[in-house]
Amino acid sequence: MTTASVPATGTSKARVGVQRFGTFLSGMIMPNIPALIAWGIFTAFFIAVGWTPVPALATLVGPFIHYLLPILIAYTGGNIIYGVRGGVVASIGTFGAIAGSDYLIAQINADLPADNQLGQVHMFIGAMIMAPICAYSMRWLDGLWEGKIKAGFEMLVNMFSAGIWGFVLAIIGFYPIAWVVNGIMQVLSNAVDWLVSMNLLPLTSIIIEPAKVFFLNNAINHGVLTPLGIQESADTGSSILFLLEANPGPGVGLLLAFTFFGIGAARASAPGAAVIQFFGGIHEVYFPYALMKPMLILALIAGGMTGVTTNMLLGGALRAPAAPGSIFAVIAQVANNSYVAVLLSVVLAATVTFLISWVILRASRKRDLEAMAATDDAFGAAITQTAAAKGKTSAALDGLRSGAATSADGGIEPATMTEREIKNIVFACDAGMGSSAMGASVLRNKIKKAGIEDVTVTNKAIAALDASADLVITQNQLTDRARQKTPGSVHVSVDNFMNSPRYDEVVDLVRAQHEDGTA
């Protein structure tokens, strides 16, 4: 049984669609970030302009980025869709795209002078295209003869069908896909070059910062910025594009403004959120603070533009993606001679966001205090309703003094509180790693302190949710997508994974089931 939901409007459907697309891209890229970091370390140490040049070991850098990373991404994407079988055929198809791109570049360079020849195009976007094509088509083909194979011939058919279809997909990757991706990369590269030449790159913050707040950043970051940044870094040793989205300055500036000038629960939780965002790299913790007062997105945009401008003027860049977006990850990937520029970009981005946020928060302080008082009254009524539905009072519910507990805001509906036995609680976010892991840890500790056993609390990507989840907790911007994946689960929305009153409701619900003998 799920919580009630308002029918999605056209705008929200579009947002959910972009989020789902971004989640799929993130699902392919994020598990392979360790490989990108390893490549960045090889680059930092062993290339000719690295810290400790070693020509022999530097020969690993090219094949690493040109073959290994795209094939890892393709395998991961195919595996998400159709398991190992999907991953294998996706890898075969992507290798065809890599070879096709190299052949195309060689044909073009044959007619160009030696000093004007094109470099290799690395098939990151090609892998993201080939993975779903290969995996979905393999699954469709398997469905055609499912249940029709004579006993004893299953392995023969499975092996040869995947091999033959992989052969076909490699040819498709070699010709149309490689040519299309090379064209896409050329257009995107030209667009970035134009923005840089016209000193307009800071304007990208107008898109990136609002997209982050509404959980739409993965489509931009993993779909465009990371592939282009890796391409540029392979050619020049570093790229400013890795800093457009990962700079922790705007987020920590916003949270510091709430720390000093916020009110209520937002002010109380902001210092902890700032530590997690800046040092832990989990940017999602500041999104709810911006959504509380959308005008603050202007402060984030201004901070983001400040950071990009600083890096443009002073040459700040990273060798590889900083993931998660922690200040430690950023420092670890800073290119040689760029430390001052990158660190200054973080400080200035935080400062500008802090100052503008301060002005906005101070201007609306009186109105916010009045609104908070009204919200507290409404929440008290919701607590009473929940306790009445349970038939008894609860210290946990009585202690809640922030947030909203109505089903429209994503709380646990009183009518559904005891309809499903809660054994498996799952926190879900885009990648299933950062913010959801943090939230799962917080709730796990609460359940342990309450003396409740035989209840598991785990974290997953939304795309990996299944019917085994009895209760799913997501940030409110992502709940619609989670409901679509597991309509039979109880769904709880929270504003902030770090500190939400919903956690006490969940603990109270599980405790009540144990006391009633239903668990």
Image: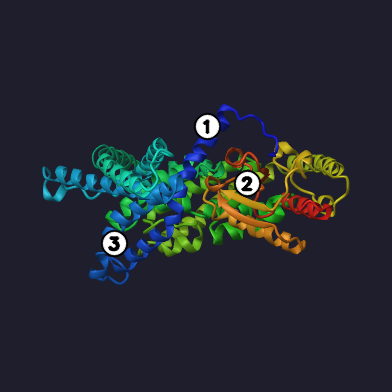
Q: In the rendered structure, which amino acid carries the disc numbered 1?
A: Ala
Q: How many marks?
A: 3
Name the residue tied to disc 1: 14
Name the residue tied to disc 3: 61
Residue 279 is left or right of residue 265, and the answer is left
Q: In the rendered structure, which amino acid carries the disc numbered 2?
A: Thr
Q: Which mark is residue 477?
A: none
Name the residue tied to disc 2: 474
Viewer-side residue, 303 vs 148: 148
Cα distance between the residues tagged 3 and 2 = 39 Å
Residue 124 visible, this orientation: no
Residue 141 is left or right of residue 259, and the answer is left
Residue 42 screen position, x and y as percent = 33, 65
Disc nearer the start of the sequence (1/3): 1
Q: In the rendered structure, which amino acid carries the disc numbered 3?
A: Val
Cα distance between the residues tagged 2 and 1 = 19 Å
SS class of the residue under badge 3?
A: helix
Cα distance between the residues tagged 1 and 3 = 40 Å
SS class of the residue under badge 2?
A: strand
Q: Residue at x 37, y 54 (%)?
A: 72
Disc nearer the start of the sequence (2/1): 1
Image quarter in which the N terminus is found = top right
Disc nearer the start of the sequence (3/2): 3
Q: Dots 3 and 2: beta carbons under 8 Å?
A: no
356 relative to 339, above or below = above
